[in-house]
Image (tube, helix red, strand yellow):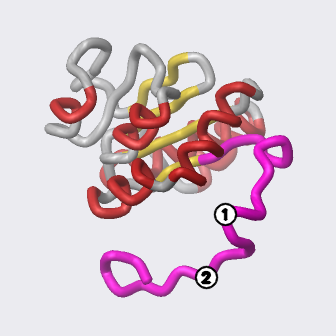
Amino acid sequence: MGAHNIPIITDCLITEINANDLDMIVLPGGWGGTEALAKNTTVQSLLKQMKQSDKHIGAICAAPYALNAAGVLSDNYTCYPSIENKIRLEGYSSNQNIVVDGKVMTSQGVGTAICFALEIIKTLQGNDKYQQIKQEILAEC
């Protein structure tokens, strides 16, 4: 059950996930969930495996905190304002909705989620698909 009592139905357990089978992992925001992700050894191990395998990693809102806990947060990042104080000030960008540094992508929060999703599409499907969907949904990113 999510923080707002929205049920979440998974396709599999996290213990069944193999980093080699993934193109990208994206962590959702929200402080409670982020703390849980940062403390979960299975999640932390998976994040490290993704980084070691040179796979894409994304995090939005408070979730860059969990990336930092795993030691996979890139030098440059953004996050929900004030969370940077729990991570580190060096490399934090307050004036960018999305920061892509190598294969790690971070975004500020719910208001930047559509542009974040489009950036994920660009990363995984290419610029043509990004432009097509951006135009179809009338996004201004």
User: Mainly helix, strand or loop, the magenta region?
Assistant: loop
Task: Give the SS element for disc 2.
Answer: loop
When asked about the image quadrant of residue 6, the answer is: bottom left
Residue type, numbered disc 1? Ile
Residue type, numbered disc 2? Ile
Residue 14: give its label.
1
Task: Give the SS element for disc 1.
Answer: helix
Using residue 66 as the reference point, say whether residue 57 is left or right of it: right
In which quadrant of the rendered image does the C terminus lie?
A: top left
Who comes first in sequence, dot 2 or dot 1?
Answer: 2
Name which residue lies at 61% across and 82% down.
9
Circle 1 Cα neighbour tier, 10 Å, few/some/many (<14 / 14–19 / ≥20): few
Circle 2 Cα neighbour tier, 10 Å, few/some/many (<14 / 14–19 / ≥20): few
- In this view, the residue in front, 83 or 126, is 83
When asked about the image quadrant of residue 112, the answer is: top left
Give the Cα distance between marks 2 and 1.
12 Å
Query: Whole-percent x and y of residue 66?
Result: 41, 43
Residue 134: give its label.
none
User: Which residues are the magenta region?
Assistant: 1-25
- In this view, the residue in front, 98 or 52, is 52
Camera-side mark, 2 or 1: 1
Using residue 20 as the reference point, say whether residue 89 is left or right of it: left
Residue pointed to by mark 2: 9
In which quadrant of the rendered image does the N terminus lie?
A: bottom left
> How many numbered discs, if any?
2
Query: Whole-percent x and y of residue 12?
Result: 73, 72
Name which residue lies at 32% across and 40% down.
108
Magenta-colored stretch includes residue 54 = no
